Image (cartoon, rainbow, N blue to C red):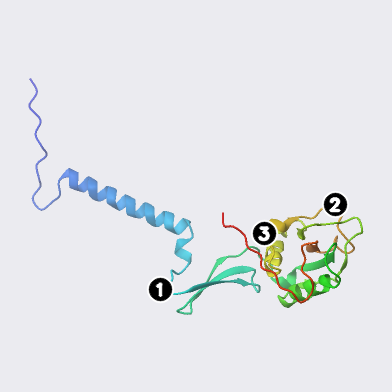
């Protein structure tokens, strides 16, 4: 006949099995949390203190998005591309925008540091109700940054069509084609997008 089971005996100065198991589980949870936090990028950015203001700006020198806290610290939270604006050739074409809007948009993009092609009209076969920002292969992140400079939504960014929309577009990395939604010179527009 088998002996009846008894509860584990406590060791002198030690922990019983149940307490040791709980301690191991707690340590595993803490280590797991730290690993997830580090992999999620949380370890690379500074947290603003409670009550501090955070501003998000487009960092056109590095094509990133920066967060600046009231304490003055700046951390880069996203970098869409590895190229600097001066390494990206942008061309602005006017399809259906007001006269002079291609030159105005080109000046605005150039002021952000981009290399600019000569602004001109799109091919006569191109008509757009909504402006588009096209990119050559490998330049999607840069096209998104150019769209932000113009206050356009990311949904306006598309791969370069074939045939290209106008003269010089085959040599540019990013091509902005202005549509009927382009505001006349001297007016300002605000673009808002819903967060996903």
Q: Which quadrant of the figure has residue 81?
A: bottom right
The first of marks 3 and 2 along the sequence is 3
Q: CA distance from mark 3 to mark 2?
A: 21 Å
Judged left or right of residue 167, residue 69 is left
Q: Is residue 62 above or below residue 160?
A: below
Where residue 29 sits in the image (x, y, percent)? 33, 51
Q: Is residue 34 above or below residue 149?
A: above
Where residue 110 sits in the image (x, y, percent)? 76, 75
Q: Secondary structure at mark 1?
A: loop
3 or 2: mark nearer the eye: 3
Q: Secondary structure at mark 2?
A: loop
Taking the view exactly as shown, the residue that stands out farthest to the right is 124
Where residue 103 sits in the image (x, y, percent)? 83, 73
Would you call the spot at circle 1 few (<14 residues within 10 Å), some (14-19), or many (20 or more)? Answer: few
* Marks 3,1: beta carbons within 8 A: no
In the picture, the quarter occupied by the N terminus is: top left
Q: Is residue 169 visible?
A: yes
Residue at 32% across, 50% down: 28
Judged left or right of residue 162, residue 53 is left
Q: CA distance from mark 1 to mark 2?
A: 51 Å
Q: Is residue 173 visible?
A: no
**Which residue has dot 1 on it?**
51
The first of marks 3 and 1 along the sequence is 1
**Which residue has dot 3 on it?**
154
The first of marks 1 and 2 along the sequence is 1
Q: Which quadrant of the figure has residue 98?
A: bottom right
* Marks 3,2: beta carbons within 8 A: no
Q: Nearer the viewer, residue 92 or 26?
A: 92
1 or 2: mark nearer the eye: 1
Would you call the spot at circle 3 few (<14 residues within 10 Å), some (14-19), or many (20 or more)? Answer: some
Q: Nearer the viewer, residue 129 or 68?
A: 129
**Which residue has dot 2 on it?**
162
């Amino acid at each position: 006949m088998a002996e009846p089971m008894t509860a584990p005996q406590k060791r002198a100065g030690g922990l019983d099995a149940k307490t040791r198991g709980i301690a191991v589980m707690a340590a595993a949870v803490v280590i797991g949390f730290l690993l997830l936090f580090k992999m999620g990028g949380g370890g690379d950015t500074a947290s603003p203190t409670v009550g501090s203001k955070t501003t998000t700006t487009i960092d056109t020198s590095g094509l990133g998005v920066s967060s600046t806290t009231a304490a003055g610290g700046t951390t880069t939270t996203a970098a869409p591309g590895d190229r600097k604006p001066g390494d990206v050739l942008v061309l602005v074409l006017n399809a259906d925008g007001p006269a002079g809007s291609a030159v105005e948009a080109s000046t605005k993009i150039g002021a952000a540091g981009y290399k600019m092609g000569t602004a001109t009209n799109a091919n006569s076969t191109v008509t757009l109700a909504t402006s588009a920002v096209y990119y050559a292969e490998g330049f999607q992140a840069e096209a998104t940054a150019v769209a932000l400079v113009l206050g356009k939504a990311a949904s306006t960014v598309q791969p370069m069509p074939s045939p290209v929309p106008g003269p010089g577009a085959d040599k540019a990395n990013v091509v902005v084609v202005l549509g009927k939604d382009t505001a006349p010179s001297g007016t300002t527009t605000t673009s808002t997008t819903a967060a996903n």
